[in-house]
Amino acid sequence: MTRMTREVLVAAVLALAIPGAAEEPAEPGSGHEPTKDLIDVLRELRHKPPSPPHDYKKRMVAGSPVLGYSPTTGVSAGVAGNVAFYTGVPEGTRISSVVTSATATTKAQVLVSFKMNMSSFENRWRIEADNRFFWTSQPTYGLGADTSDAAKLDMKFNHFRIFDKYYHQVHRNIFLGAGLVYNIHHNVRRPDDVDPEVFADSPYITYSEEFGFDVDSQTSSGVSLHALVDNRDGAINPSRGWYANASYLMFFEDFLGGSSNWQQFSYDLRTYARLSRDARHKIAFWTFGDLVTGGTAPYLDLPSTGGDTYARSGRGYPQGRFRGQEMLYAEAEYRWTVTNNGLFGMVAFVNTETLSNEQADEKLFDSFATGAGFGFRFMLNKRSKTNLCFDIGFGEQGSKAVYFGVQEAF
């Protein structure tokens, strides 16, 4: 999906009453209620009987109209959907997930995305996709983690991204992979209400002219190499295990229109721990780094807040709020299932990020941008453990934001 501030899955999630989403019986003598999701609630309100026992071969589908608001997009409306499925028996195959959305906004933005994480039978291979087609706009504040809200300047552009990766299993939870990366920001221009002279002195124009980039269109195109270890008990809503991914991205000038030669090293580490035996209390940790290690990246391809696949980092700040040649990020989130039936939960989170700005000689750890907040969870589909999420985040300099979406932040 795009940034969660842009979307709210309207919980008239008459959500394609999911075939086979049956109520799970309580374990005898456990004292726990049967697990319940929003589909069960809707069936009860409509006086419908429970669905027959579920079959893992059936896809778990949820879809809904999308409504939302943020200062960046204005009012947005569209559709969004999530499909989860198994390609083999659940005991030996990880769940696969596809998330798509298409929205339009009152600020003349059209946002279409397709994200996929698919595992084959017995996890012998997996495919990940992050594809975006945006006719959009976004403010820029300059580089580094010490920029001021007063430096905000809006930009319009078309952003098309294709980042597809293939992984092959080399051991039980270890994978090696490679991918194709194509990222273009085209028709970059000033909004009508921005003074031409002010835009000419913007961080984007200054950076682009300093390094010889075309200010109208910039492309990063190349290949990627990946090493992955993943022993989580699920990708959508894990309760234990850890995830570690190291990536090296190489971009080439003139390859599929590439604007420059440059390289980036990225890592992504996540771990999850149960604080109670029944997993109603959990804690999750996430840290990642995006580091330009050579060459010069186009301005809008530099590491930035919300630049991860699902745009979930930096809750409390708008997407793209901080940007720099190097970025390190860390977040911790406490997750609590409030009701015994699993229908309602809450979270509390805190995050921080630090970025470099070579032009101003600002290095990593010179300054930090920290955010925190809380949120609510409603079980949308108990088979896939997919939650409907509502978060409120707060950052420095009075920054705040409301987020709606499906699946956990990480």
Image (cartoon, rainbow, N blue to C red):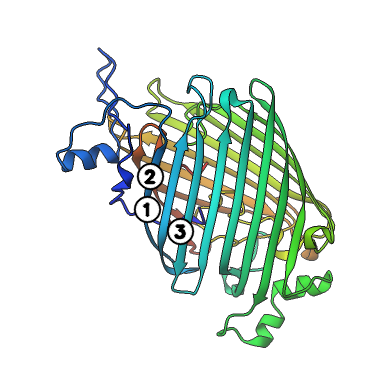
User: What's the distance in space between the residues labelled 3 and 2, CA to CA?
Assistant: 19 Å
Amino acid type for the residue under numbered disc 1: Leu
Look at label 2 and name its amino acid. Ala
Front-most of 62 and 154?
Answer: 62
Could you tell whether 104 is left or right of 172 in the image? left
Q: Can residue 231 be seen in this view?
A: no
Verify CB contact (< 8 Å) between mark 3 and mark 1.
no
**Mark 1 or mark 2, which is nearer the start of the sequence?**
1
20 vs 155, left or right, is left
Say which element carries label 1: loop
Query: Is residue 225 among what the camera can see?
Result: yes
Above or below 104: residue 327: above
Q: Which dot, 3 or 1, sits closer to the camera?
A: 1
Residue 342 drawn at (x, y percent): 31, 32
- Residue 62 is marked as 2
Horizontal and vertical percent for residue 199? 67, 81
Kindly report which numbered mark, 3 or 2, lies closer to the viewer in this rendering.
2
Disc 3 marks which residue?
5
Whether label 3 touches label 2, CB < 8 Å? no
Label 2–label 1 contact, CB within 8 A: yes
User: Considering depth in this image, is 336 or 311 the residue closer to the camera?
Assistant: 311
**Secondary element at image label 3:** helix
Q: Is residue 292 placed above or below 361 in the rendered structure?
A: above
Q: Mark 1 points at which residue?
A: 9
Give the crowd class for mark 1: few <14, some 14-19, many >=20 residues within 10 Å.
Answer: many
Lateral position of residue 43 relative to residue 18, left or right: left
Circle count: 3
